[in-house]
Image: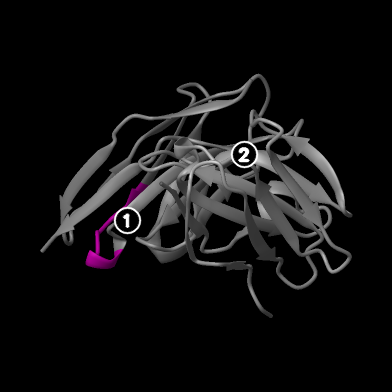
Amino acid sequence: ETGVTQSPTHLIKTRGQQVTLRCSSQSGHNTVSWYQQALGQGPQFIFQYYREEENGRGNFPPRFSGLQFPNYSSELNVNALELDDSALYLCASSSPGQGTSGYTFGSGTRLTVV
Amino acid sequence: AQSVTQLDSHVSVSEGTPVLLRCNYSSSYSPSLFWYVQHPNKGLQLLLKYTSAATLVKGINGFEAEFKKSETSFHLTKPSAHMSDAAEYFCVVSDLNTDKLIFGTGTRLQVFP
């Protein structure tokens, strides 16, 4: 049983650019959640996807968007990057009925905006 | 709204001595509470979870936490620290309305030989 895989592991972008981060969920998990962890802070909920639909969103602007695919993998897209978007982006997957009790986190993508 | 407050940003202990990481929670209903650990350049690993069963919860690697409703606390303890316990620890509450996790600001645990 594979865990949650995120790619790339590290990324450097210029302010104003767009970025796409990818997440492969754990086998059997159909729910994917994304979190942003700024340096020295706890992770903050961005949004969650369930059966390819957004199923809850945190306090993030619309330039943060996502997708979930039929195989339950997911993408996080960020447009018009700002310096404050520099953070570790974590993906977590869970299976039906487990909710937050069954989260499995990936190792994250470290995004640096310069 | 649910929230958690981690009372210490840094805790330092000697190897072999007890560990205590403190967390208070705020919730309008019976919460689901978790402790996660994050080692450098790693993702988050679940240590233990409380979901309204036994108030003393045992987790992995010898950690345990006690849910105290009267004190709105969920402190993490371990009888004897190991060097490998050095990491960032997060106290977390689950928002049942939105199925999301709400993290504390973290406690960095240092273990000295």
Q: Which residue is mark 1?
A: B87
Q: Residue B94, relative to residue A32: is it above or below?
A: above
Q: Position of residue B6 (x, y in %)?
A: 38, 32
Residue at the spot 71% in from the left edge and 57% down from the top edge: A75
Q: Quadrant of the C terminus of chain B?
A: bottom left
Locate residue B26: give its quadrant: top right
Query: Mark 2 packing: few (<14 Cα in 10 Å), some, or many (20+)?
Result: many
Q: In the image, which disc is placed on residue A45? A: 2
Q: Quadrant of the N terminus of chain B?
A: top right
Chain for disc number 1: B
For the residues labelled 2 and 1, the Cα–Cα distance comes to: 22 Å
Q: Residue A49, relative to residue B103: is it above or below?
A: below
Q: In the displayed structure, does residue B78 sit left or right of residue A86? A: left
Q: Amino acid at mark 1?
A: Ala
Q: Which residues are magenta?
A: B77-84
In the rendered structure, does residue B103 fall within the stretch colored magenta? no
Chain for disc number 2: A
Q: Position of residue A22 (x, y in %)?
A: 66, 62
In this rendering, the label closer to the viewer, 2 or 1: 2
Q: In the displayed structure, does residue A30 sit left or right of residue B58? A: right
Secondary structure under tag 2 reads strand
- Figure disc tally: 2
Locate residue A24: give its quadrant: bottom right
Q: Is residue A103 visible?
A: no
Secondary structure under tag 1 reads strand
Q: Residue A100, relative to residue B4: is it above or below?
A: below
Q: Position of residue B91 (x, y in %)?
A: 47, 40
Q: Amino acid at mark 2?
A: Phe
Residue at the spot 77% in from the left edge and 30% down from the top edge: B97
Q: Nearer the viewer, residue B15 or B36?
A: B36
